Amino acid sequence: MASISAQSNRLDLLLSEVKEVLIKVGKRDLVGDVLSLQKKISASNQEIATHVSDNEVFRKDEQESKPSPLDGLSEEISAFSRREQELFNDRELELKLLRTKLSGLYTTLNIKQAQLNHYQIEEAKYGGQLVPPRLVFAIKDLKEEMEKIEADVRRIRERQVGLMG
């Protein structure tokens, strides 16, 4: 009886820690699942306390024939913890990938901006008259490429917000 009570208390403490981590990570929807598990543990403890007094002596065959109210609860908690840890790790990896992509896009955007500046300086040298068509098309193409890159940056930023919140 004492060992079951001690184990239940440890499970409750572990679940409290899991609940705090979920709140910090921003997964308030999973906190309800943790609270449900804590209620199950509490109900099991109350059931044990009402059916067993401290003075009773259990026979070995009775212990083996009666299923414990805590059977399967630790497996349920372990499976829940593993699933949430895997989801958390997947999100962290995806966020890291998105940060890397953003870094590359910003670098590309800076290079394109430098090229655009160079072409615009060349265009200005002509004073707006008799500008070679290759220069006009190069400027137009660079601006379009930069708009596409900026759209990609916005899309990745939105995805990051979706993963974080």
Image (tube, grey):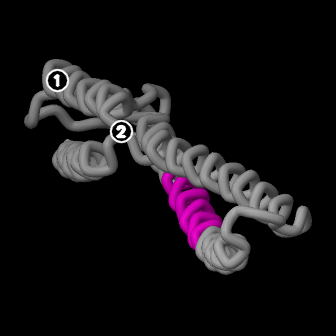
SS type, badge 2: loop
* Real-space Cα separation, disc 1 to disc 2, in angstroms: 29 Å
Q: Nearer the viewer, residue 161 or 137?
A: 137
Residue 156 tag number: none
Q: Is the residue marked by circle 1 packed among few (<14), some (14-19), or many (20+) residues within 10 Å?
A: few
Question: Which residue matches tag 1?
Answer: 46
* 152 on left or right of 44: right
Q: Residue at x 68, y 78 (%)?
A: 125
Q: Is residue 28 above or below residue 17?
A: above
Give the position of the N terminus as an image quadrant. Answer: top left
Q: Residues within 10 Å of mark 2 (few under 14, many from 20)?
A: some
Q: Quadrant of residue 128?
A: bottom right
- Label 1 residue SS: helix
Q: Which residue is mark 2?
A: 27
**Amino acid type, residue under disc 2 in the picture:** Lys
Mark 1 or mark 2: which comes first in sequence? 2
Q: Is residue 69 left or right of residue 20?
A: right
Residue 118 horizontal/vertical position (percent):
67, 80
Residue at point 60%, 44% (across, down): 155
Q: Which residues are magenta?
A: 86-106
Tally of marks: 2
Regarding residue 17, the answer to whether it shows in the image is yes
Q: Nearer the viewer, residue 116 or 156?
A: 116
- Residue 116 point in image, percent of width and height: 67, 71
Q: Nearer the viewer, mark 1 or mark 2?
A: 2
Residue 7 visible within the image: no
Q: Is residue 74 above or below residue 21?
A: above
| Res 28 quadrant in image | top left
**Disc 1 and disc 2 in contact, CB within 8 angstroms:** no
The foreground one among 58 and 69 is 69
Residue 67 location (% of width, % of height): 45, 28
Q: Residue 101 colored magenta?
A: yes
